[in-house]
Every structure is written in C-alpha cells, then in structure tokens.
Image (spheres, rainbow, N blue to C red):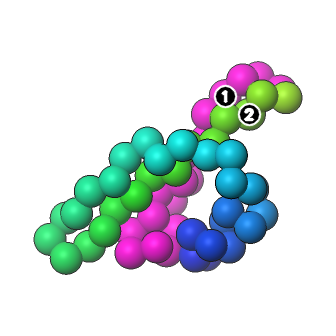
Amino acid sequence: MSKEQVTDILGSDYTIAEKRFEGSNEIEVLSYRDHYENDEFYLFVFKNKKLEKWY
C-alpha cells in the first residue's frame, strides 16, 4: 500500500515518529494511537512512500 492509501483509511491523526534517508531510500515511520481500546500505538514503516511493515 502507499502512504496515501494508509492515511485515507486511518485518517490524518498521526505523528511522524521518524524520517530519514538510507542511501537513496526515504524511510518514514507514522505512529497512530488507539485511544478507544488499550491506548496502544501502531507504527507504519514506509520506504519510498510504500508500506514496508507495521506493528
């Protein structure tokens, strides 16, 4: 998925937890907070604006 697809689904209430370059690759980590259930954080790791992993 693209970053745009993820933010379209989950909304714009996120924090940029990290943003860096590894060589020519842009790495960005978005943090979403679950206020409704367990007050947990979900991290989405993007490489060149494409979702690499989430946890």
Per the image, the residue denoted by label 2 is 34
Rendered location of residue 6, percent (x, y): 67, 65
- Extreme-left residue of the structure: 23
- The kind of secondary structure the magenta stretch mainly shows is strand
Amino acid type at image mark 2: Asp
Specify start and end residues of the magenta stretch as a single range: 37-55
Would you say residue 50 is visible in this rendering? yes
Crowdedness near tag 2: few (<14), some (14–19) or many (≥20) residues, C-alpha within 10 Å: few
Per the image, the residue denoted by label 1 is 40
Q: Is residue 48 left or right of residue 9?
A: left
How far is disc 2 from disc 1 in space, using C-alphas? Answer: 5 Å
Above or below — where is 22 with respect to 19?
below
Disc 2, disc 1: CB below 8 Å?
Answer: yes
Residue 19: numbered disc? none
Residue ID at (46%, 73%): 49
Rendered location of residue 37, percent (x, y): 83, 27
Quarter location, residue 2: bottom right
Crowdedness near tag 1: few (<14), some (14–19) or many (≥20) residues, C-alpha within 10 Å: few
Residue ID at (34%, 62%): 27
Q: Is residue 22 left or right of residue 1?
A: left
Rendered location of residue 31, percent (x, y): 55, 43
- Extreme-right residue of the structure: 36
Residue ID at (49%, 74%): 50
